Image: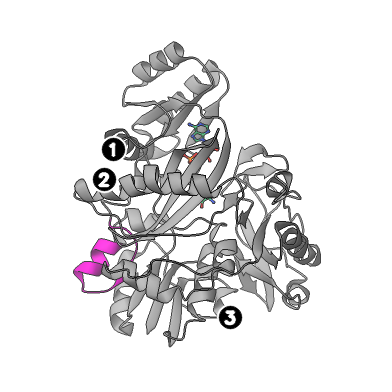
Amino acid sequence: MKILVVGGGGREHALVWKIAQSPLVARVWCAPGNPGIAQLAECVDIAADDLEGLLTFAVEQDIDLTVVGPEAPLTLGIVDRFRAAGLTIFGPTQAAARLEGSKGFSKDLMAKYGIPTAAYRRFSDRDEAVAYIRAQGAPIVVKADGLAAGKGVVVATGIDEAVAAVDAIMVDGAFGAAGAEVVVEEFMDGEEASFFVFTDGTNILPLASAQDHKRIFDGDRGPNTGGMGAYSPAPVVTAEIHRKILETIVRPTIVGMAREGCPYAGILYVGLMIAQGKARVVEYNARFGDPEAQPLIMRLKSDIVPVLLGCARGEMRQTELEWHDKAAVCVVMASGGYPGPYEKGFAISGLDEAAKIEDLFVFHAGTAARDGQIVNTGGRVLGVTGLGATVAEAIAKAYQGVERISWQGARYRRDIGRKALNRNV
Ligand code: AMP
Ligand code: GLY
């Protein structure tokens, strides 16, 4: 088979790494890819949101399966375009990707199908949103309706902060059209986890549990990021909670989407808040998590290609995935200053040293090749991912890799995975 992976981050590097190992696969391309991916696949210089360019390439190369990594092409309708051209593609349609692309849509779906989540109201009028916030009190959460690159959510500890968030989104237009509407919702306390299932629109195949670290600083302090590290399995998702998530959240979501006339196929990412043995939805994403994909895929024993193909064709037959017994921990190394402005173009050293370490893999995200060197070009630069018999051993392995690698200003959290240890698992 000939496979095209769309995207160029750590998540796509992990997907390509796994897909390339499948005996079903003859050639793998990645658009646009990155220097790490280039060691495993042929990178083509087409942007992930250039639907026209991607379609032309897929038709020309007679691609058997296209796998979409990031949300932008999904919400732009890449799946609809490819299907209309008779191509097989993994991911939700534009209508189904609204689960991620519109917070209002996803909250209304949850309300209609009784899926546990924070109480909320939608507003397209600034004054009404402010009046509601004043009546509810703080803490309270304000979200731009549309995609805002992970920056459209403000968890406000005071009323003034919440009102300022509404003004930034609706009056100042901080996120453009994505902020024409806001969702104001109840603050939920608890521990977050990321839950993923493969689905063909009807059948559901859950992945192992995982947990992300969204804040930039140790101890979950500082501003939100795309994710500074992840591990799997996540002990907060006990067997009982896993069962409840499938029954009370995942199944009604998939059934609800089908009933609404927009069946959801692809990978569904449910962001959860877990407290007192109950899980509630924080948000849905229409794609794999990044960095969660990195530890999850390193633990996955089953061939991923038949699963991706089954979801894309609407006939997934697998009922179980096989996992390595080992735990996996991914530590993200980011550019100095991230998630704020940062300097690019510094040479990265130690990648060859890290490559010699057993049970360790360094996934590339924001890197580029320049004058025979690898340099940082993005916020999140590398996902250093280690395997170990326990989470503690996987943490030690990942940091062994991190210590070998450096560039000017590189930053990373030193406490990735500690939450799992605090539970004594
Ligand atoms: P989202 O983009 O919806 O995932 O929100 C980003 C982050 O904001 C989440 O990962 C949570 O840490 C936090 N968050 C979002 N909604 C809530 C909520 N209702 N209560 C508490 N924290 C929230
Ligand atoms: N790790 C968070 C995300 O992929 O959105």
**Image: magenta residue range:** 79-93
Residue at the (36%, 64%) spot, across then down: 50
Q: Nearer the viewer, residue 31 or 238?
A: 238
Circle 2 or circle 3, nearest the eye: 2
Q: Residues within 10 Å of mark 1 (few under 14, many from 20)?
A: some
* Residue to which mark 1 is pinned: 113
Residue type, mark 2 in image: Gly
* Residue at mark 1 to residue at mark 3: CA–CA distance: 45 Å
Task: Answer whether labels 1 and 2 touch (C-beta < 8 Å).
Answer: yes
- Upstream in the sequence, badge 1 or badge 2? 1
| Residue 213 place in picture, x, y as percent | 62, 47
Q: Tell me residue 164's x, y (percent).
A: 50, 22
Quadrant of the frame with the N terminus: bottom left
Residue at (60% x, 62% y) in the render = 295
Residue 100 appears in the rendering? no
Q: Position of residue 230 (x, y in %)?
A: 62, 54
As rendered, which of 328 and 292 lies closer to the eye? 328
Q: SS class of the residue under badge 3?
A: helix
Q: Amino acid at mark 3?
A: Gln
Report which quarter residue 292 is drawn in: bottom right
Tell me: residue 380, above or below residue 28: above
Q: Earlier in the sequence, mark 2 or mark 3?
A: 3
